[in-house]
Image (cartoon, rainbow, N blue to C red):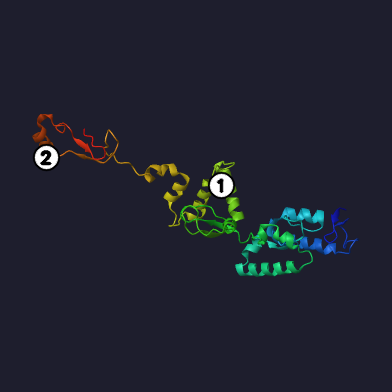
Amino acid sequence: MALIKCPECGKEISDKSEICVHCGCPIKNTMEEVKENDSKIEETEFFTICNKCGNINFTNKTRIENTAKSQGYPTCMMCGGKITILAGKNQWMKKSKQDREDIVQEEIQRVKKGSDYDIEKANGWGKGNGLRPDLDVQGYCPKCASNYPKSKALKEGRTTCEFCGTEIEYSDMLVSDFGELWEKEKKKLGIVIPLNGEPIERLIIKTFLLDNDKFNEVLFNKKWHPEQYKSQSQPVEKNVPKCPTCGSPDIKKISGLSKAGSVALWGLFSRKVHKQWHCDNCGSEW
């Protein structure tokens, strides 16, 4: 026999009890609900909603089993309140978007009307909006492959790429599933902690943009390897002759006519006979 906590009064009771000896809460039904959901679906994660804070999330099977044994009910990872299992993750994602939306909206209303609902807890995380993981899909810039999970983009109020200004696109892949791909990629590449986001964005190219005509490899490389384009972006200074006296480029060649006139006036002692340039800024000649 093991001791569990009553979901109603929190006092310890036997896991064999059908009702709580302290408050009369039906314990047997709670345990059977968990077992029924568990046996019906071969899943490792379940889509759940918390009856206390409204947190809508995927909860792994191990947590559900362990907290059901220790607390008498599966608990929310955010506040410890009792969660309701809506469906296994795979089963949930097979439903149409409209069906998922209808179920979620119905559950939100049920939770808000329930006696366990704590509005302060509900507003205490995610700024009260509780982004649902079934809607948190992988986003990216189609031109430079910048990484934009929907949760990040919504949090920042972003609709376009911060690097190149292109409108962000979203895939049908959940961020959690993309994260699993990334973990496999890290093992393959032998990366423990990436120095920057480039490997993640290379995975985005490989996963979503391989055949996308919008992808621009030059833009991608300019983001991650700007040093390659430094000489191209800076204007090359032309080799303009300057005055050796004042450094001004405001110079001009002394014409043959000017030299002839000077010789006619000053003879062989003319200053311009052996000079090539005249500076209009300081008057020097050389």
* Residue with the mark numbered 2: 257
| Vertical placement of residue 147 versus 122, above or below | above
Could you say whether the residue bearing mark 1 is in a helix, strand or loop? helix
| Spatial CA span between label 1 and label 2 | 77 Å
Image mark for residue 185: 1
Q: x and y percent of residue 129 in the render?
A: 65, 62
The disc labelled 2 sits on which kind of residue?
A: Leu
Which is in the foreground here, disc 1 or disc 2? 2
**68 lies left or right of 133:** right
Q: Residue at x 58, y 43 (%)?
A: 187
Q: Is residue 113 above or below residue 220?
A: below
- The foreground one among 184 and 239 is 239
Compared across the picture, whether 249 is left or right of 156 comes to left
Residue in the picture at 65% in, 70% down: 102
Q: Which residue of the protein is positioned furthest toward the front in this rendering?
A: 265
Q: Position of residue 280 (x, y in %)?
A: 24, 40
**Residue at the extreme top:** 269
